[in-house]
Image (spheres, rainbow, N blue to C red):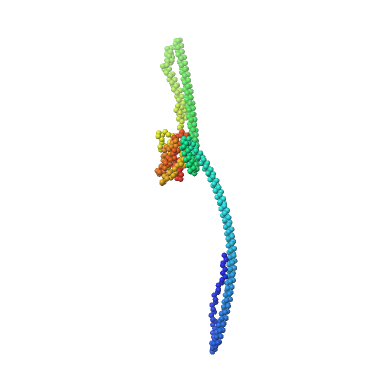
Amino acid sequence: MAKPRFDTFSVPKPAPASPPMESPPEVAEPIPVIPSQEEKDNAEAARLAELEARREAEEAARQQALALERQRQADRLESERLAAERLAQKQAQELAERQAAELAARQAREAAAMAHAQQIENERQETLAAEQRRQAEEAVRQQALALEKQQLAERLEAERIAQKQARELAERQAAELAARQAREAAALARAQQIERERLEALAAEQRRQAEEAARQQALALERQKQAEQLAAERLAQQRAQELAESQARELAERQAAELAARQAREAAAQAALGSGSLTGNQVAASNAQSQPGSPSSGMGRESNATGERGAGQKQAEASATAGGGAGERPSPKTPEPTRKAEAPIAVPAKNPLPGDICRQKVAGWYKPDMQVDLYAAVWRHTVSLEGDFELLQDAKTGPYENPIVTVAIRRDGHIDSVTVHKSSGRPEIDSAVRRVIQMLAPFPPFSRELSIDCDVIEFPSLWTFNRALRVTWRGQ
């Protein structure tokens, strides 16, 4: 900015008055002339006039110097004013240029910021639109999942409806509808877990079918081996029988030949007696051979017995040979019993029914069962959604552990027993778990197919209730 102009100047200080000039020393004269008073007055007046003239001259010189000084100050001030004006103009021009540059830069920055903000807004709008699309897709998927879950619940409910009265059915449906509307968000979160469990149950069923197929194949192989063994034994028996028949035929032929020879000898002896050509000793020897008690006859019987024993021994050896060729297997009279199917692992219940006459199953314990797993999934889902979570929260008065509880359900849906295998460490929580289960009873009855297989199902489960009640399989 230009400096303000001040039309002032400094007044120089007046020069000090010059001292009066001293008169030159007078030359001593031998005889001074004493002037008169008039001469003295004239001389004094002349001296005063001279002093006044000198003073006026000095004053004029001083005034002239003062005027020159004023002129110089005025010129200097004017030059300073002009320089200040030029500087002010230059500064004003520079300021204007700088302000213009700053304005242009600010406008450029504002334009860039506006463009960037517009781009950010566009990206935000695109992101918002994508998020809305994703939420819409997720809503559709959740709706489809909820529909599938609802269909499953309705199928199970239909089996239960057939065994209940019309009033109980209407009340149950109204309660389920109200609970479903109140807990829709939680149901959507549980649906995925139900689907995973269904897939796990399906995979377990497939593994069981594969194991059953392998067992059937092994049983078929075992039956084939037994059939081969039986065929080999029958072949050995047939060969032994043929050998025995052959030996019997040989024995019969030999006995027939001996009989024919004996008859021929007897006939010859009779003929000789008739003709008288034989001696007494020959007749006696012939009679001795023909008699059964004779030594020769005994030797014949002994040879026959020896032949029979040899035939029996050969038959036994043939049977042993046939058995050895087919491997060491039991005889057809004592066939090998068929291998029994593997028995399920017995899991003793805490409170079995009197007499142990009921058929019990443990859900998810040793091998999958589609009917049991389906009922267990619905039961666990019902407890997780409809259980009194506030009651469990109020019972948490200190540190605790997640309890493991086994609930036994009869086929009519009533509770058979509630067993706490692993306590939470808080009796209040264990009692609250029992009260929650009792409040939810009775549960839906078993289906017709499930009632045929078992009377009681045990559900070992792990209870967690940090933010919501969740019932899961024990050990899974």
Question: Toward which corner of the image does residue 414 lie, by quadrant?
Answer: top left
**Where in the figure is residue 457, as x and y percent of width and height?**
44, 37
- Residue 408 sits above or below residue 276 on the image: below
Could you say which is closer to the camera, residue 69 or residue 348?
A: 69
- Residue 449 sits above or below residue 464 on the image: above
Q: Residue furthest bottom?
A: 31
Residue for point 58% across, 64% down: 91
Could you say which is closer to the camera, residue 258 or residue 414?
A: 414
Q: Is residue 115 left or right of residue 186?
A: right
Q: Is residue 179 left or right of residue 60?
A: left
Question: Toward which corner of the image does residue 22 lie, by quadrant?
Answer: bottom right
**Where in the figure is residue 439, as x and y percent of width and height?**
43, 40
> Looking at the image, can residue 410 be seen?
yes
**Where in the figure is residue 303, as x and y percent of width and height?**
44, 20
> Looking at the image, can residue 214 be seen?
no
Q: Which quadrant of the rendered structure holds the N terminus?
A: bottom right
Could you say which is closer to the camera, residue 201 or residue 390?
A: 390
Q: Is residue 101 left or right of residue 207?
A: right
Residue for point 59% across, 66% down: 86
**Where in the figure is residue 403, as x and y percent of width and height?**
42, 42
